[in-house]
């Protein structure tokens, strides 16, 4: 029955059975990341607007047009977090984590908010699983982060994945590359889309993201940062590539990989799933060696990833099975209290058990038992004696209700 209200545009309710699937993913991620020494962090769902303006970058789409920003009663400008890295970096500084053994390895799971045009795989409230390793610039950490994400996505059985890998170099290298790219773009001004032209000075790299034919043709011959990597940047990237090779993780080099956040330096990567259509990126991340300094801290390198939970679910194409019921207890009206007592006892013994709570007759209860997927139905008679029915074979045997949990466990 429709009510006067619906979930706001771009948001959704998480219902069973999909909620079960999400819970299983959470447990798998916690185990997987825990084994690699990542501890869980929770940061607030809203932060100072300036944290994102500075951290994510004023020229990004996220900051320019996608933030849910509001002023609170104390006239502070706050923003629902559009991503997790800036908040983790803030928390790292706020809690003096530079005094801990480095790198500090943290992971998170939670809702994020971007005012984007909703479409398949793109929402205004979505969920990310993320991991950040802060405090080391070693390519070992880049490799660890990428392999962790790769193995987790494979453990979750996400199909048809491609890992794309690139490097943006250090800020200095990027600055001179930027100048080179800007002059290349200006030489080809006539072919570029208006939006690209407007941002040549501010963010020329985003031209690689453009969808229009003209710009794409120009960008096909544009110089790339990968061609211009040198010195320590080139060594860092080569080392990462050989570590990935040793770990047996396949990747495609993508010299034009630009990500929609300004804090990246050196390594960038994304996992794409070809089954997903336009929003094909399941997860992405990279190195952000300048972010913490940008937030007022000491120069501190970091690398991390975030994975879109809804995109994983879409790629899996299944929304995760019913809540499993092992034992259903069917009872006539007079024995309902006994039935409830048995169900509670079974649950305490670790057995998933259920009963009818809608006053159904015997036939209705057996239908319900069937629908629940129970392996066994315990049928109580008018005198409170029990019979266990194997739902697959139909075999029946009397059971002692005093020792039911032991018998069925
Ligand atoms: P991002 O690429 O902006 O990176 O987002 C990460 C993932 O979140 C995407 O690959 C996608 O799966 C999912 N995602 C993003 N926007 C939406 C949306 N509107 N609806 C559904 N899913 C979405 C970051 O957020 C960085 N903080 C990642 C990172 C961590 N880099 C370093 N550490």
Image (tube, rainbow, N blue to C red):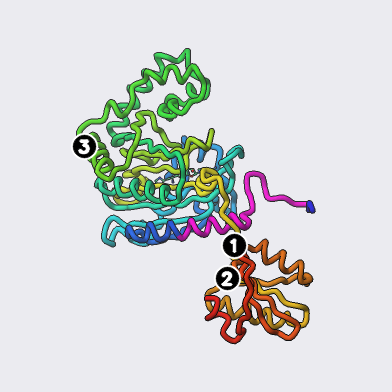
Question: Disc 1 and disc 3: Cα gap in Å?
Answer: 50 Å
- From the viewer's perspective, tell me whether residue 200 is left or right of residue 118: left
- Please indicate, yes or no, whether residue 394 appears anywhere in the rendered image: yes
Between 222 and 372, the one nearer to me in the picture: 372
Between 259 and 320, the one nearer to me in the picture: 320
User: In terms of image quadrants, where is residue 121?
Assistant: top right
Q: Residue at x 26, y 38 (%)?
A: 241
User: In terms of image quadrants, where is residue 379?
Assistant: bottom right
Instruction: Classify mark 2: residues with Cα within 10 Å, few (<14), some (14-19) or many (20+).
Output: some
Give whichever of discs 3 and 2 has the lower sequence position. 3
Question: Disc 3 and disc 2: Cα gap in Å?
Answer: 55 Å
- From the viewer's perspective, tell me whether residue 209 is left or right of residue 115: left
SS at circle 2: loop
The residue indicated by pointer 3 is 235
- From the viewer's perspective, tell me whether residue 261 is left or right of residue 395: left
- Mark 1 vs ligand 1: CB under 8 Å? no
Q: Mark 1 and 3 residues: CB-CB less than 8 Å, in contact? A: no
Instruction: Classify mark 3: residues with Cα within 10 Å, few (<14), some (14-19) or many (20+).
Output: few
**Residue 352: which disc?**
2
Give residue 325's position: percent from left, percent from top: 60, 67
Residue stretch in magenta: 4-27
Q: Residue at x 58, y 56 (%)?
A: 321
SS at circle 3: helix
The residue indicated by pointer 1 is 323
Q: Residue at x 40, y 28 (%)?
A: 205
Give residue 37's position: percent from left, percent from top: 32, 60
Q: Mark 3 and 2 residues: CB-CB less than 8 Å, in contact? A: no
Between 206 and 142, the one nearer to me in the picture: 142
Give whichever of discs 2 and 1 has the lower sequence position. 1
């Amino acid at each position: 029955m429709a009510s006067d209200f619906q979930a706001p545009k771009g948001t959704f309710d998480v219902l069973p059975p999909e909620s079960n699937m999400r819970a299983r993913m959470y447990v798998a991620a916690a185990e997987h990341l825990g084994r690699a020494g990542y501890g869980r962090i929770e940061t607030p769902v809203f932060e100072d607007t300036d944290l994102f303006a500075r951290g994510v970058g004023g020229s990004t789409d996220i900051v320019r047009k996608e933030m849910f920003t509001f002023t609170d009663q104390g006239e502070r400008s706050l923003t629902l977090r559009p991503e997790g890295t800036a908040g983790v970096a803030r928390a790292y500084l706020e809690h003096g984590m530079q005094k801990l053994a480095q790198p500090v390895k943290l992971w998170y799971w939670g809702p994020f908010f971007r005012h984007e045009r909703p479409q398949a795989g793109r929402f205004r409230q979505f969920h990310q699983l993320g991991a950040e390793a802060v405090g080391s610039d070693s390519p070992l950490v880049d490799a660890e982060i990428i392999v962790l994400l790769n193995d987790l996505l494979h453990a979750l059985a996400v199909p048809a994945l491609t890992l794309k890998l690139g490097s943006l170099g250090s800020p200095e290298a990027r600055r001179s590359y930027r100048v080179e790219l800007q002059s290349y773009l200006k030489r080809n001004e006539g072919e570029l889309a208006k939006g690209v032209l407007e941002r040549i000075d501010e963010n020329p790299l985003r031209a690689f993201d453009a969808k229009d034919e003209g710009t794409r043709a120009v960008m096909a011959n544009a110089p790339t940062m990968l061609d211009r990597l040198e010195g320590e940047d080139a060594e860092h990237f080569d080392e990462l590539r050989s570590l990935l090779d040793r770990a047996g993780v396949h990747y495609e080099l993508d010299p034009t990989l630009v990500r929609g956040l300004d804090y990246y330096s050196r390594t960038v990567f994304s996992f794409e799933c070809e089954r997903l259509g336009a929003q094909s990126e399941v997860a992405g991340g990279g190195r952000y060696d300048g972010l913490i300094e940008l937030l007022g801290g000491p120069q501190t390198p970091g690398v991390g990833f975030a994975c879109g939970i809804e995109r994983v679910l879409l790629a899996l194409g299944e929304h995760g099975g019913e809540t499993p019921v092992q034992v259903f207890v069917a009872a006539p009206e007079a024995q309902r209290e006994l039935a409830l007592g048995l169900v509670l006892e079974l649950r305490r013994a670790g057995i998933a058990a259920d009963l009818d709570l809608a006053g159904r007759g015997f036939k209705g209860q057996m239908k319900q038992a069937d629908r629940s997927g129970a392996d066994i139905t315990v049928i109580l008679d008018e005198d409170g004696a029990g019979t266990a029915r194997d739902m697959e074979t139909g075999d029946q045997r009397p059971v002692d209700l005093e020792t039911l949990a032991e018998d069925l466990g």
